[in-house]
Amino acid sequence: MRFRPPSLPISVTCCRLFIEWCATGSASASFVPRSRWSTGRASGTRILRGFSRLLCTAILTVPLLLPAFTGAVAGQEAELNPAAIVPRAAGTFLGVDRCERCHQAPTQADIDNRVTDFVLLNESKIWTSDIHSQAYRLIDPAVSTLSKQICDKLHIADISQAQQCLSCHANWLKGVDRPPTYQRGVACESCHGASEHWDVPHSRADWRKKPVAEKDALGMIDVRNPVVRAEQCFSCHIGNTAEGKTITHEMYAAGHPPLPGIEIESYAQQMPRHWRYLDEKIADARAKRTEGEDPPFTNFQEFVDENHKYLKLAAGNSKELILRHHHRSAAVVLGGVVALRETIELLRDLSAGDQPEKQAWPELASFDCRACHHELTTPSRRQEQRIGSIPGRPMISTWPTALVRLAIRHVSSDRGSYDKKFAEFQTKLIALRSELERSPFGSPSRVNATCSELTAWLTAEVVAPVSAKLFDDRAVADATNVLIVIASAEQHDYDSARQIAWALRVLSCDASTDSARGKAINEALESLALSLRLDLPNGLMHSCAPLSSIDPSRQLTPLAIVLPTTLATTIDFDSEVFRRHMQKLRETLR
């Protein structure tokens, strides 16, 4: 990344000019005409640069000495203890316009200087074809009749002031000013964090060397970490009370579409994905270079060492191991368990005694809608698939549990350790279900305590060890086998079946698709794609590769148009048909 000067007040411009002068010994031509700074002779330029660095040192050294020393100590502690990480700065959202200055398209200089080996600089342009960029427009009553209906029923006179809607549709978080470019929807800072303190520093190559804890303290969210990225996505797609991102039963009753089950990596790929994983960056950079050239991009080793510490790789072998790590498959497995943890945390927070009256327990939207909303027919597949021992008790959705066994398998050394950890998980999950069965929706204090115990266990026993472990070819094969066995031996509802099918799609990308095994899996998934709606309404066709360009004529479809078909699909879904498809696949692969 590199810096392109924004239009700023002169005081800010001068400060940034001074910082650049200190860093390079010269001022950017885009700030000051070159003739004012050049002496016309190379020797004079060297003298000027030397003088500038001495002056900067004298001015900056004294106030920076103590913070630099204490910051180094804090950084060392943070590496060992996540709780020691400096709290994230409460920066200001600067708006997507700032990001677009650099991330619309690379210049020829960017290409020549191999900046694009690290970042393609087309991320913002690709984002404009993503439904997230339309998140605010789609809830504007002037544009959407469904939004007008919802606003009328909820007595929302001005959607631009409705924080309960804009918390997710425009990233207007609780206790924070509304973003300046809120009308651009879910934009860059929604995921990457308020950029006030890191906007300029992150545009330099040496930013890649900085520890994650230091970047986090400046407000940049570490979305390269699959756990953190999943938390960001689920904060809206599941809910987060601390940020004011909570969908309510009132919203549903007014017409808000039900939140569907979401498999992070599949959604990201179809958005479309506007980033490359590290292995993809390495492959692309090497493909453009002559044989033997290394490293793939500037500050490569420092970047790997500092930004992939969650993998707990031993010093000296991280470069080769990272090439064996399947980022997409790891994101599927971690996303699956984080989905459950975030679901339980939302239930925990909603059942806490300090919730405002408007969110008093129970918040019906946090339970499975189909527990109450279903066709009254007999016989009914719902009755056959009922979870729990007491009929009629509303339960939480089952889809967040669909992929948890993949994570447990990944951290289990053998069948015995897997069985033990899975039994622990089942015990804690059944304890929560039992609390929800004691009375309709359960006692809030007891539910809260049980949720707290389950989320703590998931973090310590599953999320942390899985995120620290490499996901290699063997792990991909193991996860694939586990999914096929689960799918072929058990009944699954519509959303859980989608989780399994989506996960298999991603895993097949990291496996060998040329083999008979890979072809059989892809053929089975293709036969299920329509009934499970694996291709999202505004998603791109399934692909294993990141998107490098977009079709400017591509039109996004408002979700309200496809909602009736989507809801009908969930009703018509036959779990036994899905199970038989997976059973046939299992037999084919034997």
Image: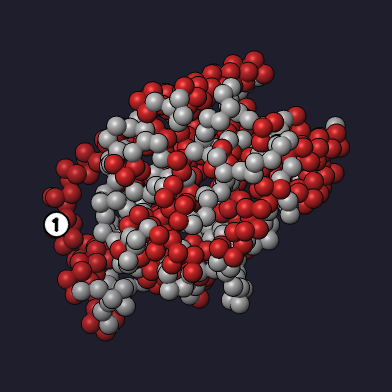
Task: Quadrant for residue 408, please give it.
Answer: top right
- The reply to whether residue 275 is visible in this rendering is yes
Residue 226 in picture, x, y percent from top left: 50, 43
Q: Nearer the viewer, residue 113 or 80?
A: 80
Tell me the residue at 45%/40% (across/down): 364
Is 167 above or below relative to 348? below
Task: Quadrant for residue 542, please give it.
Answer: bottom right
Is 569 above or below relative to 6? above
SS class of the residue under badge 1?
A: helix
Residue 111 in picture, x, y percent from top left: 52, 70
Residue 440 in picture, x, y percent from top left: 46, 29
Type of the residue with mark 1: Ala
Tell me the residue at 34%/62% (across/down): 156
Image quadrant occupied by the C terminus = top right
* Drawn side of residue 538 relative to residue 163, left or right: right
> Badge 1 local density, few (<14 within 10 Å), some, or many (20+)?
few
Tell me the residue at 63%/18% (across/down): 419
State the count of labels. Answer: 1
Residue with the mark numbered 1: 58
- The reply to whether residue 24 is visible in this rendering is no
The colour scheme is secondary structure
Q: Nearer the viewer, residue 27 or 258?
A: 258
Image quadrant occupied by the N terminus = bottom left
Tell me the residue at 31%/45% (across/down): 358
Is 585 above or below relative to 523? above
Q: Nearer the viewer, residue 186 or 469?
A: 186
Residue 218 in picture, x, y percent from top left: 29, 51
Is 552 above or below relative to 237? below
Task: Quadrant for residue 272, please give it.
Answer: bottom right
